[in-house]
Structures are given as C-alpha cells and as structure tokens.
Image (spheres, rainbow, N blue to C red):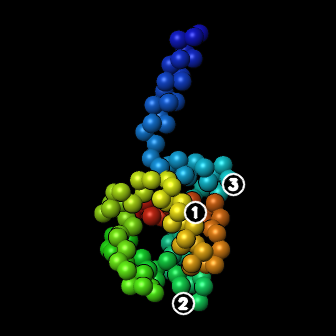
Amino acid sequence: MKHITGLILFVVAAGTLNASPADDLLTRYAGEGSGLPSAERRAEAWVREGTPGRSCVSCHTGNLRQPGSHKDTGETIKPLAPSVNPLRLGDAKFIEKWFTRNCKWTYGRTCTAREKADFLEFIRRQ
C-alpha cells in the first residue's frame, strides 16, 4: 500500500512540474469561480471599449502575433502571442501584474477571475 501511495504522489508531483504558469493560473481562477474559460467570449471583449477610447486592441492590436504600442506613450509592446513570444506567459507574477495594470487602465477596475481566465485562454491560443 505504501508503494501505491508513493507512486500516486510521484505521478501527481510530476504532472505539477510540467504545468505552465498559465495552467497554474487557470487552475487558480477556476478555484475562484471562473468556470471554464471561453476564448470566444474574450475575443469579443478584446475589441470592446472600456474606459472611453480604450480597449485591449487599442494597444495590443487585433493581431497578437504583431507588436503593439501604448495608446498614450507610444511605447512598443512586444507581441502577446506565445507562438511568437514564448516568454510572454512564462511567469505567473508577471501575468498577474499586467492583468492588474491593464484591467484598471482599460476598464477602470480589476478584472474578475472569469475575465482573466478568458483573456489568458484567448492569448495562449494565439
């Protein structure tokens, strides 16, 4: 019995080691009540205006594989698409930091767990 328990713990730990930061965040958001992420729902929100004149596409463009630029400062923003920029979703703290900043700047509030899950799923599919 001890061998079976040890084997189960090893398999669970191995699966955790292979999880990406994005996977970990999606698991956390699900625990916060996000439900299943919907890339389709976020694709629509990507272009939806929040604060007057601001939307995700305002800075990140409609093509996440291309660089964007900050609407106010003009500063270049590296592509969000992990297919072009594999480091983009490589750090959970970095992802959370930018969700906080961008949600407040774009929508004037913190995004919900569901919104973050949807955005994250949308971005990682690019």
Q: CA distance from mark 3 to mark 2?
A: 30 Å
Query: Three-letter amino acid code at disc 2?
Result: Gly
Image point 63% across, 78% down: which residue? 108
Q: Label 3: few (<14), some or many (≥20) within 10 Å?
A: few
Q: CA distance from mark 1 to mark 2?
A: 21 Å
Q: Is residue 50 above or below residue 87?
A: below
- Which residue sits furthest bottom? 53
Whichever of callouts 1 and 2 sits on the residue coming sooner in the sequence is 2
Secondary-structure class at tag 3: loop
Q: Is residue 29 above or below residue 50?
A: above
Query: Three-letter amino acid code at disc 1?
Result: Lys
Find out whether the residues at labels 1 and 2 contact each other: C-beta distance under 8 Å. Answer: no
Q: Quadrant of the N terminus?
A: top right
Q: Nearer the viewer, residue 18 or 108?
A: 108
Which numbered tag is attached to residue 116? 1
Rendered location of residue 124, percent (x, y): 43, 59
Image point 63% across, 51% down: which residue? 30
Rendered location of residue 98, percent (x, y): 51, 66
Query: Three-letter amino acid code at disc 3?
Result: Gly
| Residue ID for mark 2 | 53
Which numbered tag is attached to residue 33? 3
Image point 55% across, 52% down: which residue? 26
